[in-house]
Every structure is written in structure tokens, then in C-alpha cells.
Amino acid sequence: MKVVILCGGQGTRIRDVNENLPKPMLPVGNLPILWHIMKYYASAGHMDFVLCLGHKGQVIKDFFLNYEAHTRDFSLQLGAAKGIEYHTEHEELDWRVTLADTGQEAMTGARVRKIRKYVGNDEYFMLTYGDGVGDIDIAKLIDFHIAHGRVLTVTGVRPPGRFGELMISPDGCVTEFNEKPQATGGRISGGFFVCSRRIFDYLDEREDLVFEQEPMRNLVADGQMMMHEHDGFWQPMDTYRDYLYLNGLVARGGAPWIKW
């Protein structure tokens, strides 16, 4: 199943880490958080990625165009035309990465709509953000989505109350979605979505269409959004404190999402 990753936002709340990098390229350990997200999906068997680029998208393109040099030891003779001799291998040989320019100013809903052609005729695809990691059971998430037959599944997690709050009925159908409430006692949207291709019926042509606002509210009104509960680890990288926390987990060898 294809994995669509939103990588185009400007990340204004974390610019104090590095203003020259888009947020998905901020390092966790010695590789970008985007790589960690992709590696997690790949560990679950999903290696066909579509990256929705925007702000500083060229940095992400350059990383993947030079992926061999970024991830392997090599020797080269300066001034010679004999190429590069690689000494080590990496494990990402089966990855397919589509880098799609979805616009500098486009909002999340517009970015998803613009990559429709890369989803092709697939009935389902996964969708997530390029700045959060977790130990979600991807297989269970997909099985849950296919079983209920609705348009969208969102992973519901239990972190701080500064994200969109989800209210659900006893059967798991989302009945209310509140974007970034001041306080919350319930589950919130952790991303890690599974979408049926009918999702594109909810995305209009506006550049300022925010996926988490009108489209998701319309899905709720139509009874077409379900929540998959996740009680394990989930952590976004929104602030400098988050950046330090995630890097600390990797440095201590205790990062729950690293299952490879």
C-alpha cells in the first residue's frame, strides 16, 4: 500500500532548531525524522512512498538524489572519472520514493488532492505527517480500515491537549472533531491515517483547503470517519523540546518506533 507523507509545511514553531532545513529533515540521531517515519512503514512491509513537498522541498529532493552518499561509506579519486567505490550497503534497496512538488503555499488538503495521480487506481492508501513517530501496529490499522468500510481511519492517541480532539460513538465512528482545543481529556488525532480513494470526493480545488478542517468535518457529518485506538508511543516534533526528547530517546537506545 502506498504511503503519502505531508512534508510541505513551514514548521514555524521549531525554526530555532535549524532555519535552513524543512522540519521533516531535522535529524533524529544522524538521519532525518522523515527517514525514521519511512523506515517504520518499511519495517511493516510498505515501501512505496509519495512525499508531498513544499517549503524547502529541494532539500528533501537533494537528500534522496544523494541517498547512496548519505548512507554508505565510499571512496573516490578527486579529478578522476572512474566514479565512486562504495564499501558498505544500506537496507532501503526496495524503496520507491515519489517526490511531488505540491506548492509552497498549499495547505494539507490541497497537497493530498494534488498527489491523486500518484495514488493511481489503488483502492486504499496511507497518509501521515512528516514530523511524528510512533509504534502504531500498521497491519492492525489497515485491517481495521478495510473491515469498517468507511472513507477515513485516523489513529487516536493520548498526548497533550494541543491537537485536534476526537469524540467517538461506541462502535468507533467519529462523531465530533475539534481542531486544537484549549484543553482535552480524550483522544486526539495522531495522524497515521488510512484513506479509501473516496477521500478525493471531499477535497476541492482550493489551495487553502486544510485537510483537518472542512474535509474531516464533512466526513464526520457523513459518518465516514473512524478511529483506531493507539495506547502506545506517539510523539510529534513540534517544538525544540520535542526535538531534544526524540534525540534523547535515540541516544539512549530506547526509541520505541525503532523496530528494524
Image (cartoon, grey):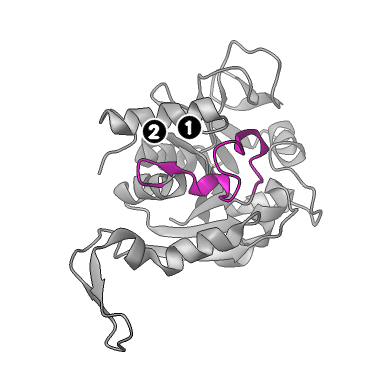
What residue does disc 2 label?
247
Mark count: 2
Crowding near pointer 1: few (<14 within 10 Å), some, many (20+)? some
Q: Secondary structure at mark 1?
A: helix
Q: Secondary structure at mark 2?
A: helix
Tell me which amino acid carries mark 2. Asn
Q: Residue at x 27, y 28 (%)?
A: 252
Furthest toward the front, the residue is 79
Q: Name above or below for residue 58 compared with residue 260.
A: below
Residue 170 visible in rendering: yes
Q: Which quadrant is the C terminus positioned in? A: top left
Range of residues picked out in magenta: 9-31
Residue 138, x across and y down, in percent: 38, 40
Q: Is residue 175 left or right of residue 234?
A: right
Residue 209, x across and y down, in percent: 77, 47
Tell me which amino acid carries mark 1. Tyr
How far, Cα to Cα, is label 1 from label 2?
6 Å
Q: Is residue 38 left or right of residue 217?
A: left
Mainly helix, strand or loop, the magenta region?
loop
Residue 243's label in the rendered image is 1
Q: Residue at x 38, y 23 (%)?
A: 232
For the residues bearing labels 1 and 2, Cβ distance under 8 angstroms: yes
Q: Which quadrant is the N terminus positioned in? A: bottom left
Q: Residue at x 56, y 18 (%)?
A: 160
Residue 210's label in the rendered image is none
Q: Is residue 111 left or right of residue 95?
A: right
Residue 120 visible in rendering: no
